[in-house]
Amino acid sequence: MKIIRANSYQDMSRKAANLISAQVIMKPNCVLGLATGSTPEGIYKQLIDWYNKGDLDFDRVTTINLDEYVGLDHSNEQSYWYFMQKHFFRHINIRPENVYVPDGTNPDAERACRAYDYIIQRCGGIDLQLLGIGVDGHIGFNEPGAAFELGTHKVRLQESTIQANKRFFAHEDEVPKEAYTMGIKTIMQAHKVLLCASGTAKAAIIREALYGPVTPQVPASILQMHPDLTVVVDHEAGACLPEDMD
Ligand code: PGA
């Protein structure tokens, strides 16, 4: 595990974007596992900036997103599909046919999730998986108690996640209660994992996930076992980490 400290959200975004850029430059046809949420927004902004400067080319890149709300279609502004178009895809030269997000409109969970696992397998696996972390330790929508051995599957969202995400919706009742998410097994199979965290609210869970016991009660704790994990934390999110971690 490599922990990189950043001194601000912007610095965290830039450092993480640098690592993603390195992946794209080293392997132009790489498969990036991507995430939504406020944490990666700045990373996407930075990547767009470097793309506009001619430093990055996404023409041969494939992206596979972590998760999607069940029941929201592409036109819904709260869908993760919409988020990704708005914050990243429509600003770069990625090919639409190389972009994957779980199909939240498919009511057949088994079929939707198996299809997603097949896509990941057909793409040859994920080269680099970008992750945020929930205040309860979730990664993707793998909530506390999630089985480590699952591939893509349907989950019921925890109350704490609904509370954390309601800020994006007009009313709390509109927050979907279910999602399709890559499982812990899917995430652990990525060749590299890049976990990013920003802000005071993440400080305790970042310490617990990286230095506490590996337990399904803290889904992100399994990342301690990943052979190629890089963590980028800003000053606040890294506040509870041991000083001498370098
Ligand atoms: P955030 O969400 O980036 O909006 O904090 C992270 C997560 O819930 O995985």
Image: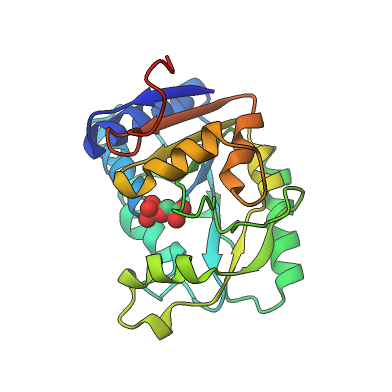
Residue 119 pos. (x, y %): 68, 51
Image quarter of the C terminus:
top left
Q: Residue at x 46, y 44 (%)?
A: 205
Colour setup of the view: rainbow
Residue 217 pos. (x, y %): 63, 52
Residue 198 pos. (x, y %): 32, 42
| 75, above or below 2, in the image | below
Q: Can residue 126 be seen here?
A: no
Quarter where residue 166 is shown: bottom left
Side (left or right) of 196 relative to 155: left
Relative depth, front residue between 187 and 210: 210
Marks counted in the figure total: 0
Q: Residue at x 41, y 83 (%)?
A: 174
Relative depth, front residue between 95 and 194: 194
Image quarter of the N terminus:
top right
Q: Can residue 127 be seen here?
A: yes
| 4, above or below 116, in the image | above
Residue 103 pos. (x, y %): 59, 68
Q: Quadrant of ligand 1?
A: bottom left
Side (left or right) of 187 relative to 40: right
Side (left or right) of 25 relative to 101: left
Q: Residue at x 37, y 41 (%)?
A: 203
Quarter where residue 122 is shown: top right
Relative depth, front residue between 67 and 25: 67
